[in-house]
Image (tube, coloured by chain):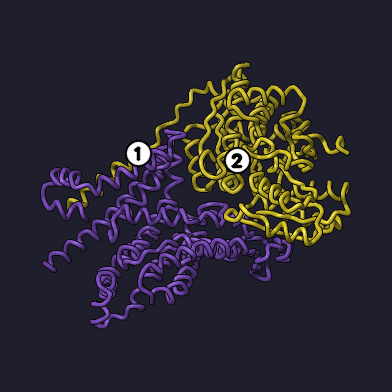
Amino acid sequence: MKRLLALMLVVVMCAAVMVSCGNKDDGNTLKIGGIGPITGSAAIYGQAVMNGCKIAVDEINANGGIGGMQIEFNFQDDANVAESSVNAYNKLMDWGMDILVGTVTTTPCISVSAKVYTDRVFALTPSASSTDVTKDKDNMFQLCFSDPNQGTGSATYIAANMADKKIAIIYRNDDAYSQGIRDTFAAEARAKNLNIVYEGTFTEDTATDFSVQLTAAKSANADLIFLPIYYQPASVILSQAKTMDYAPTFFGVDGMDGILTMENFDITLAEGVMVLTPFSSDAEDDLTKNFVKKYKELYGEVPNQFAADGYDCIYAVKAAYEKAGCTKDMTRTDLCEALVKAIKEISFDGLTGQDMTWSDKGEVNKMPIAVVIKNGDYISAEAAE
Amino acid sequence: MKKFNLKKTTKVDFATYLGVIVTFIVLFVMQNGGMLSYSMSGMLVPICCFIVMAVSLNLTVGILGELSLGHAGFVSVGAFSGIIASQSLIGVIESASLRLAIALVAGAIFAAIAGVLVGIPVLRLRGDYLAIVTLAFGEIIKDLINCLLVGIDSKGLHVLFNAKGLLTVEDLHLEEGGRVIIKGAQGATGIQTISTFTAGFILIMITLVVVLNLTRSRSGRAIMALRDNRIAAESVGINVTKYKLMAFVTSAALAGAAGALYGLNFSAVISSTFNFNISIEILLMVVFGGLGNIWGSVIAAAVIRLLPELLREFNDYRMLFYAIILILVMIATNNPTFKNMLGKLIPKKKGAEIDG
């Protein structure tokens, strides 16, 4: 019977822990939640978004907040795992979140977006780029390009400027981001009659050696390699191609951004690499300069695109909030409906693009910029020619 | 002596059932009364799944005495077959609970088949081969699912195996209105989340009934005899492969059902969700609760899943505290001084009480 007693005690203890702590919302703050990986292999993306968001929140709070309310920002870790992400979301709901900025990575975001849709919370993801994130969910919006936009955008750019190149693609086939962009790129390339001569894949476990893929691309005479991947594996590809004396044009998308600020990376390797990106930390406008300066002061490094996405998200929420004329006493659901309507009406200027607008599908409309790396700097592709 | 033991195990078994039932009723009432926080209600189904996974792995590791490092592989097989079953029956079967039941059965069946395939060659061997092969199995399943494209339209299921990585969902040639269920590395998306806490509870009860009755039966004694002394067991005519396979396949099937329940609780599942870390986490639950100790696995699974969420207050140091707590508990439960101290708190039957 003692075990029975012990079990009962455990039950009582658990129950005590589980009872909700109550929602202490005094209505004088706007609670914005964020979710992303702070630990695990994707931690740098979550960190960057969190830092970017914090800068924006501090700026807004210093200037009087949104609609007379100070922003309270709470960023929860999900370690890039869908289950933890949903847990983090639930935690934020207990906290009394009004608006969600997140989640950072794609697969967790798809799971969270389903919850967001049923709970009617307005959500804007800084960087989850799959179309599945926003599909059939009217209150889920993206600030980054969606995968099809990046894939077709790259194919369109190549078709317009370098149509006669023989193209090789190296992508990571156990990653939704990489696979997604590759699929839409390949489809658009077929439609545009581009010549894809080789496709090589790798996985998380084999991202340290690309000699097989590069040799195959070289023997297929590819003179343009499309890399819809993040910059860590891309840096390995660049240095291995260099040792092989193989110098095709490398063409990357937003995940390639950040390669110049990577530690221990020889930036001469990236010479001539083309990147389709919404953000470059070397841009000359005041907004970017100011942001980069603050970021360096606070976190000691050059912000990447994810940090800029996070920063823009907070300001986009502010813009939509002000456009909708929301007030303090609105409930979460009312706020959601008002923001959903308003965000489609605003035209937002941020770090990652001018005149951003949002469609009914939740996707953002902004122009990707093709940049070329010259002497360790990004310059626009038109200027390089 | 024997009689006394038998009675005690029966008592413990019934206490386990009762504990689970009471916990369920309390939580169920609290959930319906809106007394549970969002984060707690969100964790109920995953915890149920992990309890089933831990109890089923305990059958292999604790009762059969074979080390398995690929339990997540069976969970994965169950999850994806369950998702395919449930998603393709949308519109055919209206009742979500019925679809969930079918998905769980499908998950169990496919995981059992995988268990037979892995078990037949490996369980004939002695030594650590099962650990090595199950480890590989878990990784192979992950890669196989990465290559899988599945869609459904009015003509039925379309399945493509995308080994070279050159195919996309367009190659499935779905009709207008067809649905893509699994997109290779991008996993299954747009899943209708039909898992419920009640289903989780029923699955735990089924698992407990199956595992506890198997353990206490004639076959269970044969399985434990194999664990304790294989040669002696063989000498009295116990069929080694048969009984080992019985335990291993049952364990795989239950893990598959748990996987299906888990998969249908989230709207997106990718194959790397069920990676080696999950296998180790389930093994940790088994070791934590005590090898061969079923109620221990139930509590350990719940505690290990809850802990990281309860530690969210610590922000950046969350996983650090998590690891420290696990290490401390492991040390404490194996420390004679601590055991004596605990024994003094519970005066009677102290040895039996602590060793479980």
| Up/down of A164 relative to B5, above or below | above
CB-based contact (under 8 Å), mark 2 and mark 1: no
In which chain is the residue bearing label 1? A
Q: At numbered mark 1, what does the secondary structure look like: helix, strand or loop?
A: helix
Q: Which residue is mark 1?
A: A17
Q: Are marks 2 and 1 on the same chain?
A: yes
Q: What's the residue type where badge 2 is placed?
A: Val
Q: Position of residue A292 (x, y in %)?
A: 67, 26
Q: What's the residue type where badge 1 is placed?
A: Val
Q: Which residue is mark 2?
A: A104
Q: Which chain is purple?
A: B
Residue at (80% x, 52% y) in the render: A224
Q: At numbered mark 2, what does the secondary structure look like: helix, strand or loop?
A: loop
| Up/down of B94 relative to B114, above or below | above
Q: Badge 2: how crowded within 10 Å, few (<14), some, or many (20+)?
A: many
Colour in which chain A is drawn: yellow
Residue at (32% x, 52% y) in the render: B288
User: Is residue B259 at all visible to an observer of this figure?
Assistant: yes
User: Is residue A360 at all visible to an observer of this figure?
Assistant: no
In which chain is the residue bearing label 2? A
Dot placed on the residue nearer the N-terminal end, 2 or 1: 1
Q: Position of residue A103 (x, y in %)?
A: 59, 40
- Horizontally, is B56 left or right of A374 in the view? left
Residue A332, quarter of picture: top right
Task: Please give the count of numbered marks on the rendered protein.
Answer: 2
Q: Badge 1: how crowded within 10 Å, few (<14), some, or many (20+)?
A: some
| Up/down of A199 relative to B250, above or below | above
* Foreground residue among A135 and B258: B258
Front disc: 2 or 1: 2
Disc number at residue A348? none
Quadrant where the C terminus of chain A sits is top right
Q: Position of residue B173 (x, y in %)?
A: 73, 66
